[in-house]
Image (tube, helix red, strand yellow):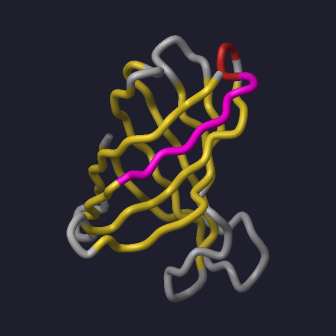
Amino acid sequence: GSGTFAYGPPSCDPPAVADAIIQGTGNATHLGRFTIELGYCIDQDGNPLTPPSGIQTAANGDQLFTQMVFSDVDPELGLFQDYIYDGGTGRFENAEGFIRLYTDFDLVNLTYSNHGEGWLAY
């Protein structure tokens, strides 16, 4: 996947100073071409105050609800984030799953690209 991130007015109470908004597209086995939108509140230093969560929309419009549960750096592979899937719409109504994404951020252009593997049951 790849996309952009931006900042907007906070949706959380202080100490939140902004919302981080991530929008992107990609291709996945069970979704085909997809879009994704994630959001989370950040403090003045850019630290997350809420876990990034959002909606991944499949090519046919069915949606998956996702939330980041862990982030770290692998010494050989770089920055990664773990996401869970919990429900959705259409064929993903009772979906469960997990994905680990390895992500490269371009902080100058506010873009990202990632790749990963996981599983999805629905």
* Quadrant housing residue 75: bottom left
Front-lying residue, 72 or 59: 72
Q: Position of residue 105 (x, y in %)?
A: 28, 63
Residue drawn at 42 percent across, 73 percent down: 72
Q: Quadrant of the rendered structure where residue 120 is?
A: top right
Position of the N terminus, as image quadrant, is top left
* Image location of residue 17, percent across then percent down: 62, 79
Number of numbered callouts drawn = 0
Magenta residue check for 4: no
Query: Looking at the image, is 86 positioned above or below residue 74?
Result: above
Residue visible at 62% across and 52% down in the picture: 67
Q: What predominant SS class does the magenta segment belong to?
A: strand
- The quarter of the rendered structure image containing the C terminus is top right
For this view, does 84 lie left or right of residue 46?
right
Q: Is residue 99 above or below residue 106?
A: above
Q: Residue at x 48, y 68 (%)?
A: 71
Give the magenta part as a residue range: 93-101
**Front-most of residues 35 and 100:** 100
Tell which of 20 and 89 is nearer to you.
Answer: 89
Q: Position of residue 76 (x, y in %)?
A: 21, 69
The image position of residue 58, as x and y in percent, is: 50, 21
| 42 versus 104 height, above or below | below
* Residue with the most extreme right position: 13
- Is residue 84 found left or right of 22 in the rendered image? right
Q: Is residue 26 left or right of residue 45?
A: left
Quadrant of the rendered image containing residue 10: bottom right
Which residue appears at 50% of the width and 56% of the height?
Answer: 82
- Is residue 112 placed above or below 12 in the rendered structure? above
